[in-house]
Amino acid sequence: MTRIVEPRPGYQALSVYRTEARAVEIDLSDNTNLFGSAPSAVASLAQWAAADPARYPTLVTEDLRLALGGWIGVAPDQVVGGCGSNDVLDSTMRALGQPGATLAYTSPTFVMTPHFAAANSLRPVPVETLPNGDPDVDALLATGAPLIYVATPNNPSGRAASQAAILRLLDRASGVVILDEAYTEYTGGTWAREAVARGNVVVTRTFSKAWGLAGLRLGYGIGAANLMAEVEKARGPYKVNAVAERAATAAVRHDQAWLDQLVATTRTMRDSVVRRLADLGFDAGGSDANFIPIRVRDARDAAARLAARGVGVRAFSAAPVVGDVLRVTIGPEPMMSRLLDAIADVPR
Ligand code: PMP
């Protein structure tokens, strides 16, 4: 077996990301858009084979950055593309963090955040959210970390950080703040233009959630042009494949009305499912995203019971602040009915 000569502290202990894959009929575990995909993107995919697959894509997502810049109201050089927002987060940490520096992050949150920090030789330091789910801004700042990560809406709570909390964080942070907006289409707001104006903020976003294009693996970052250039430098050219770039560019240009409708449909269904769960005695409120946290007595046991009935959810056991919760993606009524039937005898 090949030996790794000089193991990096914190790196060797990491493991390859795996989900608890269960054979389920209805997968509500990954917060993707179960209502469908942006139609112009789908049409673009159908035409792809007739394009020119022999050639490389654009060097650094020029076409997509132009479309996104117009959509968000920033310049194309204030946008960077990536292979999912995973990749943008990873590249941002590599580009902007000194090896050994601290990255403070709200806990609980997206599991890959501390992973990417450690993989990039940073020191991830968790800071528990407040009981209401807002980031504990004073505690984040008190770490003195040159890099601070906050997801809004957060995962697994689904809660968007209050405007006051984010403003306070941005006003006082001395280093770089990463705002992960993977689910922000569901809230309607974005800190993207603020990020550009302030110069020390990177917003990350994705086509994996509301746009319904997780299979294409496409995310992006927004921030001041000099920061985006540093992030771009952290990896090679052609990071985003041509199929994904063409499809997402078409969606951004043509599918705003579809997106608005999708968000409205998802929110209405979310509120209805939360109400119906409350009727069954479950507390599942507080989400601003396309998934809900259902508080249960024993998350692992509850997830196993649901899986036995063909419904896959993500279990969080004894997670900081939230305890035992099932994170469940909102989808069309037939899926939600199956969830509500299957969960009825799970201990609250
Ligand atoms: N951020 C958050 C908060 C997420 O929940 C996820 C996906 N679960 C991501 C980022 C990464 O998504 P992607 O790489 O598909 O853009």
Image (tube, helix red, strand yellow):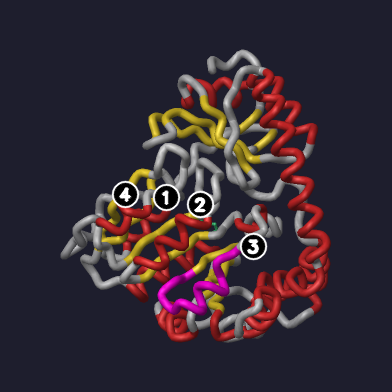
Q: For the residues carrying marks 3 and 4, which lies nearer the camera in this image?
A: 4
Residue at (47%, 80%) from the top-left corner? 228
Look at label 4 and name its amino acid.
Answer: Pro
Residue 135 is labelled as 1
Residue 268: quarter of image:
top right
Pointer 3 with pointer 4, Cβ within 8 A: no
Q: CA distance from mark 3 to mark 4?
A: 27 Å
Mark 4 — residue?
Answer: 126
Look at label 3 and name its amino acid.
Answer: Phe
- Disc 1 residue crowd, few under 14, some 14–19, many 20+, Cα 10 Å: many
Mark 2 — residue?
Answer: 161
Left or right relative to 89: residue 33: right
Q: CA distance from mark 2 to mark 1?
A: 7 Å
Secondary structure beneath dot 2 equals: loop
Look at label 2 and name its amino acid.
Answer: Ala
Lower sequence index among marks 1 and 3: 1
- Disc 2 residue crowd, few under 14, some 14–19, many 20+, Cα 10 Å: some
Residue 312 is labelled as none
Pointer 3 with pointer 2, Cβ within 8 A: no
